[in-house]
Amino acid sequence: MNTVIFAATAASSSGSSNPILPATGEIIWSVLSFALLLVVLGKWAYPPVKKMMADRADKIRGDLDAADLARAEAQRTLEEYREQLAQARREATRILDEARQTGEALRADLLAKAEGDAANVRARNEEALRVDRQRVIAELRSEVGSLALELAEKIIDAEVDRAASQALIDAFISEIGATQA
Amino acid sequence: MLLAGINFPPISDVLNWRSILFSGTPFALNKVGLITLAAAVITLLLFFIAGRQARLVPSGVQNFVESIVDFIHNSIVVDVMGPDGLPWAPYLTGLFFFIFISNIFEVIPFIQMPATARMSVPAPLALIVWVTFITVGIKAQGAGHYFKNAVIPPGVPGPLLVLLIPLEILSNFIVRPFALAVRLFGNLLAGHLLLLTFAVISEAMFVKSIGLVVLPLPFAMLTALTGYEIFVSALQAFIFTILSALYISEAMKATH
């Protein structure tokens, strides 16, 4: 088939046999083909391809911009998180410090109170001791008085006005107390 | 009698093709006509497939088409014409694809004929470009301005103009389209004949077993030249397109 279709012949029906001169039929068909190509290409075939390429370029540009935005956004969020973390850390430190201070204060308070209590107890004890001592002294004084009186009555064997001699006895006791103290 | 085995066909046998349809009329369709039609149809198919795929990540045909479109957009339209040339991108892309596919049939098995090796293809294309850039020039600058700018070089003293104006006319309006057409035609015709020569020699040696000893030489040459011709096909399509872009761009701007 091919050999028949494409068979060459020197006696071509269109044009001369000179290899350089163009043949009419060939010129017409090449011009027609080229015209057809230009019209269809320009009207229908070229624009979609070009549009696709332009769209792709736009999309890539858009994607790059979006990626930049996203990166900036991520950077911002990261900064925010870092800031928050630092803040949280500061807060934690503050709370810890506060707790420590509170603990310290509490301890000091308790210590002070305990010391106060201890002092109170000691004071009360001392007071009780002092009262006891005075009571003992007083008792002792009256005991010694009466003993001395009895002794004196017995020794001097005289009748002594008890009331009048009381002053004498008190003076005597005080004298003793003063010398003893 | 090695050479006796080589039957080099008459040159018109490998260039003038019998018509298949409409014989005898001006619309006689032959192999060259079919190839140009195929160039148009293949280009359109490639673009329709690429446009239909329209994937974000291109592959296959879409990738191929897009790389060429991108190449023409950047290396030809923007580099040569600047942003003003962008409306011309489809025209130049069409030109490139049409010439490249017409060329590349030079190495496609069983077809092996570059349509551009016939003057019938480069000549009309050059003519179309010629008409295009003149029209653009007249539209952009007005007929008077355009032709004045195109033929009178700036800063040249009066007497010399007598000499220069004919030269400028010759170079800008006659040599340009002629060179465009002949450059493409000559390159592809030469390539076609080169490939043919080595193919014929290889075949003759293969048939005559005595030549088998030297067969690798012409066959290696044939292989290397096939690769070279693929390169030439792309290069010539590129040169034609970039020169067209340059001429149109020149016509658009009042350079002087």
Image (cartoon, coloured by chain):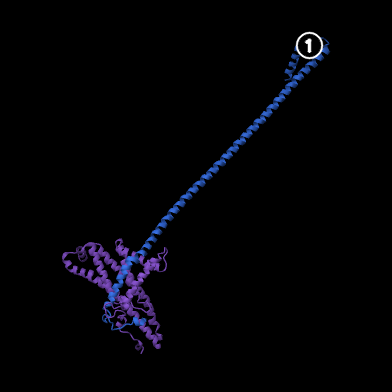
Chain colours: A blue, B purple
Q: Nearer the viewer, residue B213 or A50?
A: A50
Mark 1 surroundings within 10 Å by alpha-carbon count, few (fewer than 14), some (14 through 19), many (20 or more): few
Q: Position of residue A21 (x, y in %)?
A: 26, 78
Question: In this image, B49 relative to A99: left or right?
Answer: left
Q: Is residue B253 above or below residue B231?
A: above
Residue drawn at x 47%, y 50% is: A77
Q: Position of residue A159 (x, y in %)?
A: 82, 9
Question: In this image, B158 relative to A41: left or right?
Answer: left
Quadrant for the N terminus of chain B, please.
bottom left
Residue drawn at x 67%, y 28% is: A120
Q: Position of residue B240 (x, y in %)?
A: 30, 70
Residue A165, quarter of picture:
top right
Q: Nearer the viewer, residue B135 or B239?
A: B135
Q: Residue furthest left?
A: B159
Question: Residue under mark 1: which chain is it in?
Answer: A
Disc tally is 1
Residue A19, quarter of picture:
bottom left
Q: Is residue A145 above or below residue B227?
A: above
Amino acid type of the residue tagged 1 in the rendering = Arg
Question: In this image, B195 relative to B166: left or right?
Answer: right
Is residue B173 in view?
Answer: yes
Q: Nearer the viewer, residue B41 or B91?
A: B41
Judging by the rendered image, the residue that carries numbered circle 1 is A162
Q: Is residue B105 above or below residue B207?
A: above
Is residue B76 in view?
Answer: no
Q: Residue furthest bottom?
A: B1
Residue A43, quarter of picture:
bottom left
